[in-house]
DNA sequence: CTAAAATATTGAACTTTGTTCATTTTACAA
DNA sequence: TTGTAAAATGAACAAAGTTCAATATTTTAG
């Protein structure tokens, strides 16, 4: 029965791939079961043989997007030396990823899964994602006594909440400015947090 | 033609009142033109004689909710002396308002109006709302040399972004904790910002 | 006061989207 | 080759936003 599982995973993959393309292209708002299925080369009804519902399918994309975001961050910060400077660069790269793909921000932070219990692990990793990206650098700061444990706890939390809030306000047009100015502002905020 | 305008405003008011009740009660997700019209005592089609579309109607609620939130904040902080201590209390009361009415947070920060140009003034006042609530206290800090202008700019921005981010993560279940613990955490964050 | 004109209200109907299910198609083992 | 299990599918339904022609009400002119 192993063949069956391979085939099932492959077809799930087609739907997930189609969903990811639409989220990255037109965004989450123009996502619907019919255009997902079209792009995957199946009928919309077939989708329900592989996923409980549409929410279930789109939350399957979270892990892939996290991997992709991590790559983007590594590409932009991997050459920097560990420490506070790289934390700033990581946070900036993290923000720029979501600005490039607003639909992914919506999926990560705004979309509500119907069945919260089943999706809780996914929601947890979203919450801790930026911390995970900075983990090595926080460890570096700790072991080199650049910050105390208490400082690290405060700073990492401030980074997480501040960046999330800025992105929400910017992407939802409550915070009107252009990209360049926004990146300057978020850089200032990040520096204010890290540099004390 | 003044009578006409009074009548039109009155009927718009019935729809707005109905919408506000549903947002505060069942939340934005169970809001639809048919249950709004039912509660207002009209047909759903009548709604379109008074509002361009459903988005237009629900954004009309923003001002009323801001007034209500301001009252809530004043009730909880009006007796305190102006200054940094009251800024903390205002930010906490502001957060507690949105926690009591998650639907109002969604309306303020997540809901997207189709016609962004027409709604931009509303979006601007949402962005500056917390700053407005704290305005007297920031002025107090400035004139008493408790903080420099630069500090006030940084701190007010940090407060705005940090509180918005925490509320988003908490209300959308990325940040799993109970109400009491959350209020402790947000108090710590606010203190870290204000107390330097 | 009445009839015509203007205005307001309304349900029917259309669109879009998510979902279910009975039916058809396909794959495969005997 | 054929019978059966699995997979794929379109028809159909529900919920929601929106439009519009028809109906009801109000206002106005004679």
Image (cartoon, coloured by chain):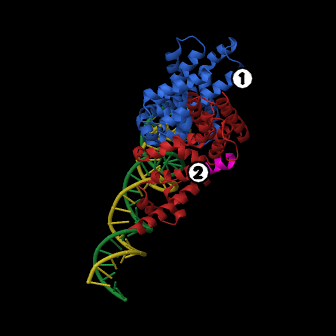
Chain colours: A blue, B red, C green, D yellow
Judge by depth and name the residue closer to the eye, B152 or A184. Answer: B152
Regarding mark 2 in the picture, which secondary structure is present there?
Answer: loop
Quick one: quadrant of the C terminus of chain B? top right
Tell which tag, 1 or 2, sits nearer the viewer: 1
Tally the marks. 2
What is the x, y in percent for residue B113? 45, 46
What is the x, y in percent for residue B190? 66, 34
Q: Name the chain under label 2.
A: B
Disc 1 marks which residue?
A150
Label 1, residues with CA under 10 Å away: few <14, some 14-19, many ≥20: few
- Residue bounds of the magenta highlight: B65-77
Regarding mark 1 in the picture, which secondary structure is present there?
Answer: helix
**Vertical side of A108 occupied by B27: above or below:** below
Is residue B26 something one can see in this rendering? no
For marks 1 and 2, give the CA distance: 38 Å
**Vertical side of A3 occupied by D17: above or below:** below
Disc 2 marks which residue?
B27
Label 2, residues with CA under 10 Å away: few <14, some 14-19, many ≥20: some
Q: Name the chain under label 1.
A: A
Residues at marks 1 and 2 on the same chain: no
| Residue at image location 55% in from the left, 26% down from the top | A189
The disc label shown at residue A117, or none = none
Quick one: quadrant of the N terminus of chain B? bottom left
**Is the stretch drawn in magenta largely helix, strand or loop?**
helix
Image check: B186 left or right of A38? right
**Does B76 appear in magenta?**
yes
What is the x, y in percent for residue A147? 68, 17
**Vertical side of C16 occupied by A68: above or below:** above
**Does A26 appear in magenta?**
no
| Contact flag, marks 1 and 2 (Cβ < 8 Å) | no
């Amino acid at each position: 029965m192993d063949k069956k599982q391979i085939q099932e995973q492959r077809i799930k993959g087609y739907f997930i791939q189609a969903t990811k393309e639409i989220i990255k292209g037109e965004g989450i708002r123009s996502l619907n079961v019919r255009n997902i299925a079209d792009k995957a080369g199946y009928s919309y009804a077939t989708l329900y043989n592989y996923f409980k519902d549409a929410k279930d399918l789109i939350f399957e994309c979270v892990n892939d997007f996290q991997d992709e975001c991590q790559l983007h961050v590594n590409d932009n910060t991997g050459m920097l030396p560990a420490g506070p400077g790289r934390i700033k660069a990581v946070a900036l790269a993290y923000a720029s990823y979501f600005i490039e793909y607003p639909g992914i921000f919506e999926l990560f932070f705004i979309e509500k899964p119907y069945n919260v219990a089943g999706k809780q692990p996914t929601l947890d990793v979203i919450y801790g994602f930026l911390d995970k990206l900075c983990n090595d650098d926080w460890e570096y700061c700790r072991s080199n006594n650049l910050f105390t444990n208490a400082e690290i706890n405060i700073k990492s939390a401030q980074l997480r909440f501040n960046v999330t809030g800025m992105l929400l306000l910017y992407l939802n047009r409550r915070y009107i400015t252009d990209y360049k100015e926004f990146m300057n502002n978020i850089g200032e905020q990040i520096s204010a947090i890290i540099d004390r």
